[in-house]
Each structure stands twice: as C-alpha cells, then as structure tokens.
Image (cartoon, rainbow, N blue to C red):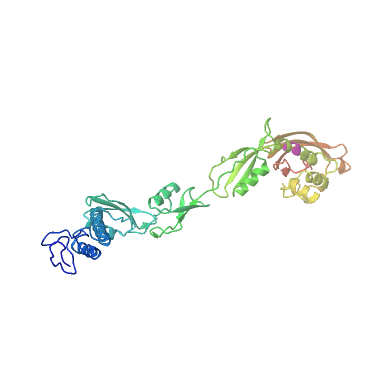
C-alpha cells in the first residue's frame, strides 16, 4: 500500500499511523484507499507495537497480568509476616512437659536455656518418675520447677492410733479404707493393714486398715430388765443384776443404774452391772415368813414341810422340781443335826412362839431368829403335857423375784433336849 499523500510505498503488511516521509495521518479513512483493510491493519499494528489503543483482547490480558502481580505481592507480604510471627513463637514457646518422664523434660528444658529444679512428690495419679506439675517461666531463661511422682511405699502403721495412721497414709498419697475388728487390744489402735509395710503401692490400690474396736456399753437406762439384758447380750457383754429398793417415782422392773456407764469401751465378755428397781426385799420378806411357818409351825411335820417349801422355791434352786420328802431332807435337814436322833423326835409337832426376820437391803438373803415351842405328847406315856422351847437361827437366800433358793438351820428341825440317866 502507498501513502495517499506522497505516494510512499508502505508495503502490504503493516500500516503505520503516519507516513514516514510526509507525515500524513494514515488514520483518516478518507486518505487511505481500502479504509477497511487499512483500519484492520492499523489495529493490528497498534496491538503489536503498543502504539494506539490496541484490541479489547489485549487490554484484558494486561489487566490479568496486573492482578496476578498484585496478588503475588500480597501473598508474599502475608507469608513474611506469618514467618516472622511463627519464628517468634517458636523461639519463645515452652513445651508442656507434664506427663513426660523427668529425664526427657530436663533435657528439653535445659536445651532451651533453663535451669531445672526437681521436687519429688507422692501421688496416686502417676507412676514414679513422671512429671506431674511444671512451673516454667517464659523467655527461655530462669529456673523451671518440676514436681515428679515418686514411688509410694507402705508405711508401718501397726500399733498407731487411727488418726496417726490416716495422716501417714495421706502423706504418702495412699488411698485407704478402715475395717473395725473386735479384739483385746487398745480401742482405736491399728492392728495391721492389708499391705505389708515396706511394699510399693501400685496404681490406685486401696489399703485396708484393721482397727481394734472394743464393744461399747449400750445405753439401757430406763429400759426394762429384759430389754437391758437383751441389749447387753447383743453387744457381746455379760451382766449382773442388782436389785434396787423401790422408791416413789421409780417404776418396778426398770434399770436405774449402769456400771460401767453407757458408751464405755469394755472387753468382749466383760460383765456390766445394772441396778433394777425391785420389790425383791418385800417379796423376800414374805417368802421368809412363809418358809419359817412351813418348817416350825407344823402340826403334822414330815413330808408336809417339803410340800410347803416346794411352793416357795425358785426355779433356780437345786431342789426345784424334786419330791416333797427330798425337799424336806435336802433343805431342812442338810446340816445333819437330826442324825442319831429318834425319828419320833424329828417329827414332833411344833409352833412358832416368836420370830424376828432381817432381810438384806437388796432382798437377796435373810436371817431369822425363831423361838419354837415343841409338844412332846406324841411320844406316849410319860410325855403327857411335856413341852419345850428353843431358839433356831436360820439363814435363807432368794432369787431376783424373792423366791426361795436355800434354807439352812444348823440345828435342823429338831428340838434342843438333854437326855438324863
């Protein structure tokens, strides 16, 4: 193509914006023949050389390149900031050494510039040699203080008081339970433990302490005699019942005293004395009067005396349930004063002239001084109208209900007499 102004041959491929010789504006379609072809060529030249506006496609490519450049710069900046912060954090970060073995924790901390101070502590929450607590200052310098689990050894607690033994186990971080056992030892003392002293305590093993616990005297004040006896027996204790004279305001049959006092630690089988309000004394008085009358106020002595005494006997008497004759001989004639005496004299009718009976305060015994009048007429000729009087001293014992246990007359039921030649 030629320049329309000066005729310069411009070639057929690329069309410049102006003619290099005359400077004609080759953009003007009126100057350029084949304006459509020239316009297309001109746009091609602008796109290739960067002169002029260029094509839409070229402008889009430039924008993408610019965006990529900005993105790259941004990513680079962010990366630099992150790397700086990561480096700072890495240099200042302290490892969490809790749960590490001490040797590893010590090596790591010393490598970071720390001095290491170790304290051994007993704990059931970790094995021996494991770090259970760490106090490490920031900054990579200073002293890191580590608490390290140590092996737990069972202390010797035998013979200790319970509180002392508990303190020893707490100090060694050993879980424990308490089992009370009866025995003859001192109350509240540790007899032993389920784990031998000196043995290592593994894991969360629970040690059982065996502690002596003596029985306590139960509180039986105000209870009936039967209730008190049952409570004492249930506690593994013996008992002695002491009758207390009846007084106003005290119910008969109730416990009004306990020795040792309620709550006292005693050995198994020890006896506790309880005082029970009783009418024993008055009951014993009545029994003593009837027994004296049965023996010394008899018109037809003999087995009838045994029958009368049987009605007064305590179930605890050795003669309870025996026949009348055995009771008469076993109780009244036990002293042997009748031996060698004519059997007719042993059966003389007799009567009580007077009697003085003294019953002990607790009603358990009595002494009677009995003046007896004897009638000898039954012996036949020569004894008509013959009588005699003598004094008999009798001792008797009674059970808690005032019933007769024993009857003793050293002279037996034989009159005092003298044989003259």
Q: Is residue 287 magenta?
A: yes
Residue 174 image position (x, y, % from top left) = 41, 54
Q: Residue furthest top?
A: 248
Q: Is residue 51 magenta?
A: no
Does residue 11 lie above or below 413 as drawn?
Answer: below
Does residue 9 lie above or below 220 as drawn?
Answer: below
Q: How many marks are shown on the rendered structure?
A: 0
Q: Residue at x 20, y 64 (%)?
A: 45
Magenta stretch, overall SS: helix
Residue 91 visible to the viewer? no
Q: Is 323 left or right of 178, judged from the image as shown? A: right
Q: Is 187 left or right of 197, judged from the image as shown? A: right
Give, as a single range, the part of the protein colored magenta. Answer: 284-288
Q: Residue furthest bottom?
A: 12
Find residue 199 and report its image quarter.
bottom left
Residue 163 image position (x, y, % from top left) = 44, 47
Q: Is 289 left or right of 380, judged from the image as shown? A: left
Q: Nearer the viewer, residue 66 or 13?
A: 13
Q: Residue at x 68, y 33 (%)?
A: 246
Find residue 263 and report its image quarter.
top right
Residue 308 visible to the viewer? yes
Residue 138 image position (x, y, % from top left) = 25, 49
Residue 325 image position (x, y, % from top left) = 80, 50
Q: Quadrant of the C terminus?
A: top right
Q: Nearer the viewer, residue 6 or 410?
A: 6
Q: Nearer the viewer, residue 218 or 69?
A: 69
Q: Nearer the viewer, residue 184 or 396?
A: 184
Q: Residue furthest left?
A: 21
Q: Quadrant of the N terminus?
A: bottom left
């Amino acid at each position: 193509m030629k320049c329309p102004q000066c005729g310069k041959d411009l070639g057929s491929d690329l069309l410049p914006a102006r003619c290099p010789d005359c400077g004609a504006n080759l953009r003007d379609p009126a100057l350029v023949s084949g304006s459509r072809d020239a316009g297309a060529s001109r746009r091609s030249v602008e796109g290739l050389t960067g002169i002029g506006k260029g094509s839409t496609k070229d402008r889009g490519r430039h924008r993408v390149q610019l965006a990529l450049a900005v993105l790259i710069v941004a990513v680079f900046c962010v990366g630099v900031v992150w790397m700086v912060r990561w480096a700072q954090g890495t240099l200042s970060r302290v490892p969490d050494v809790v749960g590490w073995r001490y040797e590893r924790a010590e090596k790591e901390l010393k490598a970071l510039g720390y001095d290491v101070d170790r304290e051994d502590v007993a704990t059931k929450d970790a094995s021996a040699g494991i770090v259970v607590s760490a106090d490490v200052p920031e900054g990579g310098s200073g002293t890191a203080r580590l608490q390290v689990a140590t092996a737990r050894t069972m202390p010797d607690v035998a013979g200790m008081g319970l509180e002392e033994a508990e303190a020893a186990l707490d100090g060694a971080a050993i879980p424990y339970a308490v089992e009370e056992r009866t025995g003859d030892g001192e109350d509240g003392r540790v007899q032993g433990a389920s784990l031998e002293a000196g043995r290592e305590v593994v894991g969360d093993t629970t040690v059982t302490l065996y502690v002596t616990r003596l029985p306590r005297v139960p509180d039986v004040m105000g209870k009936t005699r039967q209730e008190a006896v049952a409570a004492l027996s249930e506690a593994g204790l013996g008992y002695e019942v002491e009758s207390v004279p009846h007084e106003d305001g005290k119910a008969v049959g109730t416990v009004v005293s306990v020795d040792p006092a309620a709550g006292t630690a005693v050995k198994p089988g020890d006896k506790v004395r309880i005082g029970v309000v009783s009418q024993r004394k008055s009951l014993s008085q009545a029994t003593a009067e009837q027994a004296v009358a049965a023996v010394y106020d008899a018109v037809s002595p003999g087995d009838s005396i045994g029958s009368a005494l049987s009605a007064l006997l305590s179930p605890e008497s050795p003669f309870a349930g025996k026949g009348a004759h055995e009771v008469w001989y076993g109780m009244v004639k036990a002293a042997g004063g009748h031996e060698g005496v004519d059997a007719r004299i042993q059966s003389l009718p007799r009567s009580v002239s007077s009697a003085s009976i003294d019953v002990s305060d607790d009603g358990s015994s009595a002494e009677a001084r009995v003046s007896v009048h004897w009638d000898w007429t039954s012996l036949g000729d020569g004894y008509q109208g013959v009588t005699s009087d003598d004094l008999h001293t009798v001792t008797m014992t009674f059970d808690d209900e005032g019933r007769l246990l024993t009857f003793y007359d050293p002279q037996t039921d034989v009159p005092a007499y003298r044989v003259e030649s």
